[in-house]
Amino acid sequence: MSSFFLRTLREDPADAELPGHKLLVRAGYVRRAAPGVYTWLPLGLKVLRKVEAIVREEMEAIGGQELSFPALLPKEPYEATNRWTEYGDNLFRLTDRKGTQMLLGPTHEEMFCLAVKDMYTSYKDLPLTLFQIQNKYRDEARPRAGVLRGREFIMKDSYSFDIDEAGLQKAYDAHRDAYIKIFDRLGFEYVIVHADSGAMGGSASEEFLAVSPNGEDTFVRDASGYAANVEAVVVPQAPPVEVTAGPAHVEDTPDTPTIDTLVAALNANHPRTDGRAWTAADTLKNVIVMLAHPADEDHEEPWREPLAIGVPGDREVDPKRLEAQVAPAEVEGFEEADFAKHPTLAKGYIGPGVLGSEQASGIRYLLDPSIAEGSAWVTGADEHGQHVIDLVHGRDFTADGTIQAAEIREGDPSPQGEGTLTLARGVEMGHIFQLGTKYAEALGLKVLDENGKLVTVTMGSYGVGVTRAVGVIAEDNHDEQGLIWPRALAPFDVHVVAAGKSEEIFGAAEDLSAQLEAKGVSVLYDDRAGKVSPGVKFKDAEIIGVPTILVVGKGLAEGVVEIKDRRTGERREVPVAEAVEALIGEVRGQS
Amino acid sequence: MSSFFLRTLREDPADAELPGHKLLVRAGYVRRAAPGVYTWLPLGLKVLRKVEAIVREEMEAIGGQELSFPALLPKEPYEATNRWTEYGDNLFRLTDRKGTQMLLGPTHEEMFCLAVKDMYTSYKDLPLTLFQIQNKYRDEARPRAGVLRGREFIMKDSYSFDIDEAGLQKAYDAHRDAYIKIFDRLGFEYVIVHADSGAMGGSASEEFLAVSPNGEDTFVRDASGYAANVEAVVVPQAPPVEVTAGPAHVEDTPDTPTIDTLVAALNANHPRTDGRAWTAADTLKNVIVMLAHPADEDHEEPWREPLAIGVPGDREVDPKRLEAQVAPAEVEGFEEADFAKHPTLAKGYIGPGVLGSEQASGIRYLLDPSIAEGSAWVTGADEHGQHVIDLVHGRDFTADGTIQAAEIREGDPSPQGEGTLTLARGVEMGHIFQLGTKYAEALGLKVLDENGKLVTVTMGSYGVGVTRAVGVIAEDNHDEQGLIWPRALAPFDVHVVAAGKSEEIFGAAEDLSAQLEAKGVSVLYDDRAGKVSPGVKFKDAEIIGVPTILVVGKGLAEGVVEIKDRRTGERREVPVAEAVEALIGEVRGQS
């Protein structure tokens, strides 16, 4: 350690939020070079390489062939699939000296697709799985959490190529199994969740989420094993109910632009006839947003369109669920200037009377599926200070369709019908996705089938966040004192501390280190002399987090050294002569 | 091979010029993704990883510590060293979603310097050598020769940090030795040449050039071992000579704007008094160029400046030598519009009469050092159709200084004074450079010395072209039929060809392949059945270039298989039972 390029920090770095990330910086594994862009210092690079090796091994085990595409890519293939514009600001674009536009690859579906098109022509060439472990670039709006969400990061991305759906399903299942092995070996808690709304089939897309209270993704699960990304939860359409409400009637409800003020006013001035009090769940809230669409086949320029969403008044629209439904459009606020252009909208009192493509506003109107046909609602009457009571869905109003955009709450019934949902947070560590023919069609990847007919190849796309994995493992494996690496990923097997000043101590520590290295056990030997006290060395050993620490100190005079388990804190003294064997036992997993 | 992602091409690719590059594409090692940007297919990636491993091993052997910086970098450090502008169009610049300018790193001096500044404070922390093997980006004006000169490429770059010159010299020497080991192991012919004009000391910068007739760099050497990049050749100042010429006299020389027309006119109309004929070497040619400087401390904007260069009329100005002298300025033509702004210049008849900072044109005027004081010249008289004869340097004209810009020619005297120079071409494979304190000063990297005084750290910078090495090895190792890999870099150890249709042949080939793999010998097994004839398989084996080929074919009926050495073409039959042992012998280098 006297010459190792490493300095631990006593203070938390200003730019770090999460505990694991703080420790990765403080213990000298990574340093920030720019927002969302990190340098891997020698310690960090060792861990990163171990993660890469595990991912590579499991990809090769399912027949994946490794190659390496550039990060700097031509624009044309990404234009052919429309991702050049769909990616919006998330794409790093640049212009070369000749004025040619290029990009830094966010993922490589297009390039893999073109490579296979370039080389393969027949169904006999398939199935095929290709992968790379390589730098990716995304210009995140809010790079955060250190290496958990960087703008330059390493990903393993793989792509499968098959002649038919059955082949794709097989490749998908193989990847799913490989990912289970990878994440089991990496040693953090994860859950496999449905990742899309199922429109393409039940298992068309799944995510592997590392369970973490600091994760950016929310997922749900029920007692029966169902788990889904919150964006992918499909709330079933409520079955129609018998209409029991009387005719709809408009009432004056001055100064009730919010659900809270409305419910209070209803209970004060318009009590229900059945004696029950009005609640927010009796109201229908209509939220208007602006969708910003990228250019597409029908629009040469990016274009904007308002959208109205009706949800029960006791629920919010979940921005992430909404985004997932409208992607690649982005969701923007509906501003005062937009209201000015839609004079039929009475802000705070908007109701289905004017909403819908065929109605006065002309604004597309989608309802939450929990709003059953036949159910009665209190909602805006489209005049300031007025609401309408007993407005019945299907009888008094209709919408253009439904949308899965309302928030999902702890205790909601499971959409699979078994019990209720619990919510938790996670970090997306892997994603497996049955792409189908979208990219192959856009780029013309066809092969001859058995009958000599050209058929479009069907693709799968699969990713593992490699740099991100190091971040997740750090979040999952630490205590107050520092990091605690799982043995398979530790930068070194044993951290040897020479705790004292005598030549005997340094001599014995060096000798033991050399013996261990000779047996293939990697050692970080703290040989620092001079003013570095044993206390500083112990602190550094704790923060660096090598799983086994060997202390050569005062006990040496009695012929013993101390072996400490970083995770359990357990210490035991062993005779010097037995130390090497004992340590090999620890490292190899026998004790 | 029936499932390996590989297709060989019978035709040369349209975008390839050099034989090695053509073969790398045809044999399925690399594919172009964009101009100067390449994809490494599975075969190519295997070779690339072997080169990387060799470079890594030798860097670790001299105590280098590996880390990994991002490719996407902030602008500020590169502004501090002025490289943001100095790099000109060669730098890939981009702007992120927040409008922040960033760059793709061409090399990482700044980042390493800042990392050490961030972590180290004392002379006790030094010496230090750090390295990375990582993607680099340069927006070359003319990307050519495939992976020999890409716009995205992998480089090993290392940096040494020392407290003093003696330390730097030691680090430099260690790198020099390591590079010799690396290039010896990679197995191509190379030469170590002086790479700068020696202004910073004899060995301040050396290049390792792979000797190759297709190389972009020209170097010189003499019989005594001196070798230098042609840009780095320092022609010594010719010592003064006694003036023997009479007074200078202007003569009419109509229609003689070129050296050839001038010499002819002189011999026809103005014969020499000594009876010798005029030659081009008697004339002084004055070449005017425009220098385009980047912005610098004294100039907020890029700026331009004309420069006049006087060389003997039998030599050209060498654009590369000139560029090296004026860098970071770029050399541009002196156009008609520029002449219009300098009315004292008589195009085709320009002479020292108007050239020089203090003369009528005000244009800086530099002479080739071969132009001795006291020597007499025929040169332009600054009037159309007139030249001046017997114009003596030092008596009749002076310049602002000298410049090393004239072409170097085969047979020129060696600047070290031993014999004459021969010229050859090469590809820059490595560069070692004593940077000194330039970067450390610009970025404030100082440490405390023994006396507690802050001193600026002195740095070295060292590079190896890793992707380029694969290109050079391919150029150096091939024949008409295809590539021939040196054993240490071959993608596989043995190429097994099942040459026939019988089950016995495929069974034996598969069995031998499995036995070899079990012994740690890597095998590319051509198991293709159906329409792939033995002839096609042999052709593919030749072009792919695995050094040892095992043919399991007709001989099997007599119990023998054939082992072929790809390089020598030598074939020998061995009994099946002895094949594995014989092949292991070949691979391990015993026969």
Image (spheres, coloured by chain):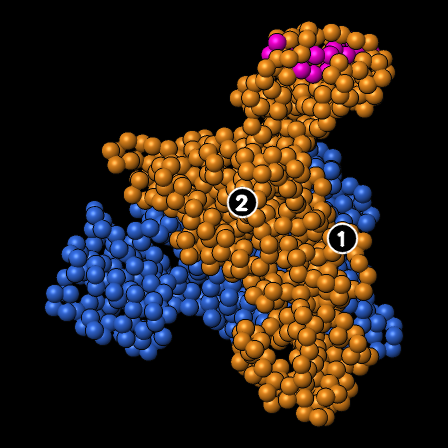
Chain colours: A orange, B blue
Q: Which residue is painted at 72% across and 70% down in the image?
A: A542
B575 with respect to A19 (left or right): left
Q: Amino acid at mark 2?
A: Gly
Mark 1 belongs to chain: A
What SS does tag 2 mark?
loop
Q: Return the x and y of residue B359 as percentages of the image width and height.
A: 79, 47
Q: Which of the labelled discs sits on residue A16, or is there none? A: 1
Q: Return the x and y of residue B164 as percentages of the image width and height.
A: 76, 74
Q: Return the x and y of residue B6 as percentages of the image width and height.
A: 36, 50
Q: Which of the labelled discs sits on residue B30, or is there none? A: none
User: Foreground mark, 2 or 1?
Assistant: 2
Residue beneath label 2, please? A225
Q: Which residue is painted at 53% across and 60% down in the image?
A: A185
The front one of B360 and B514 is B514
The front one of A8 and A485 is A485
B48 with respect to A45 (left or right): left
Q: Is residue B374 depicted above or below A318 in this figure?
A: below
The front one of A440 and A538 is A538
Looking at the image, the residue that sits furthest to the right is B452
